[in-house]
Image: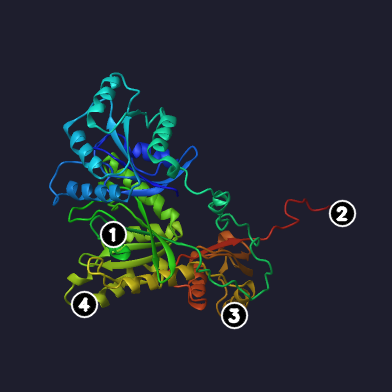
Amino acid sequence: MSFTLAIVGRPNVGKSTLFNRLVGRKLALVDDMPGVTRDRRVHDGKLYDLKFSVIDTAGLEEVGSDTLEGRMRAQTEIAIAEADVILFMIDAKAGITPTDVTFGDLVRKSGKPVVLVANKSEARGAEAGMYDAYRLGLGEPCPVSAEHGQGIPDLRDAIVAVLGERAFGPDEDDAEAEERPVVSTSETTLIGDDIEDPDADDIPAYDTGKPLKIAIIGRPNAGKSTLINTMVGEERLLTGPEAGITRDSISVDWEWNGRRIKLFDTAGMRRKSRVQGKLEKLSVSDALHAIRFAEVVIIVFDATIPFEKQDLQLVDLIVREGRAPVIAFNKWDLIENRQEVLADLREKTERLLPQVRGLRAVTISGEMGQGIDKLMESVLLTHEVWNRRVSTGRLNRWLEGVLAHHPPPAVSGRRLKIKYMTQVKTRPPGFIVSCSRPDAMPQSYVRYLINGLRETFQMPGVPIRLSLRTSDNPFAGRAKKRR
């Protein structure tokens, strides 16, 4: 990116709406209620021929530093310090307020190039607010409508005017080609299409070169944002004793032991019956999107009150989505009888979460930085298992032994025949079993096969998909010939 652009202003002037327009996607939550955005969000943006990094920030308010709003303001001040150019947004419809004047002075003192953006300029009566904006001393206001896309070409010209040649950055012809996303076909692979030689025993090695996507979820106030701040070594996300601080799903780039990682912080997820407000519903929806986008999901449990009903439902959600789960028992520094509590946690993990045997669980303290390396080791091991592939030859040799020792039961006096097994996908591991009468196969025997796969081929702690199918009968539907 050629430069970094920060969007600042008081609450409810349309910063997140403009952010979504510049990045070309609805990433930031938008609502009529002031103060929706709390953390600063960074993403790649584009404005015609300009490419840059854009930072969405919380609304500036005049409050004490020890309050939640004060901590939000500190995050915005960090964004101002990191930016090369600042878009200072006002509400042209509402006109200039004393808060605009106060923070206009703050932006001016930063010494950074500033573009004054008068949003909601399409509204009736906005012209008076436009003229009033001159008294901020930040130059000529640029009238836009972030919601409707009006005035965006003028905004591009205003940015170029304050930055000059820096706005265009280095000329890289191949940059676009390098940044093109690789479309994964793992979810749509047809049976057998990804197996070059069904009898081959050589399996590709686990690839550690690709960035690992990790979502961190949990109930409100479990310590998710604090954990990420400790991981990355800076106050990147807003934290505090208040429950439900995080609203947007924020991505943070990190590197651990040479492995590139993208962390996703999510809003705390309460029981569905308690989620009532529109904004909280949007936050939960954003968290669910982050889960589906991630590869490994760390479910943060509060070690002082673990295994609440919502905790178990979150793990079950991860398994149903096919993600790789890891449990982090946070706030371990507050536990006194650690050996006794640890034994109880292990017993409850095995008993209450039987749908994913061998689930890895680690005790940590996000605030004190304890157990982070052990947690990441468990994450990488789980991710490797999640990507594991077993050759068709090994599978069918194992299946032959299983059928000899414990064949499927007879249903309605007829024996069920299993012909062969093959793995058709990874992420998570998915297998197809060809058999007669799939509909009659007892679920208990399907679970027996899954547990056998998990134990024999070392696949603990990840979901395993097993589908049954029957081969097509070429004579089905043909009438018998009469002699």
Q: What residue type is labelled 2?
A: Arg
Give the residue number, with chain letter if any, for mark 4. Answer: 338
Picture layout, residue 210 above or below residue 28? below
What is the C-alpha distance between the residues marked 1 and 4? 22 Å
Check if mark 2's residue and mark 4's residue have beta carbons within 8 Å: no
Residue topped by disc 3: 401
Local secondary structure at mark 4 = helix
Q: In the image, what residue type sits under mark 4? A: Arg
Disc 1 or 4, which lies upstream in sequence? 1
Q: Mark 2 points at which residue?
A: 483
Q: Nearer the viewer, residue 241 or 478?
A: 241
| Label 3 vs label 4, nearer the camera | 4
The image quadrant where one finds the C terminus is bottom right
Left or right of 58, for residue 359: right
- Which residue in the structure is indicated by mark 1? 224
Report if residue 318 is visible in the image.
Answer: yes
Between 322 and 217, the one lying in front of the other is 217
Q: Do the residues labelled 1 and 2 touch (CB within 8 Å)?
A: no
Residue 163, located in which quarter of the rendered image? Answer: top left
Q: Which of marks 1 and 4 is in front?
A: 1
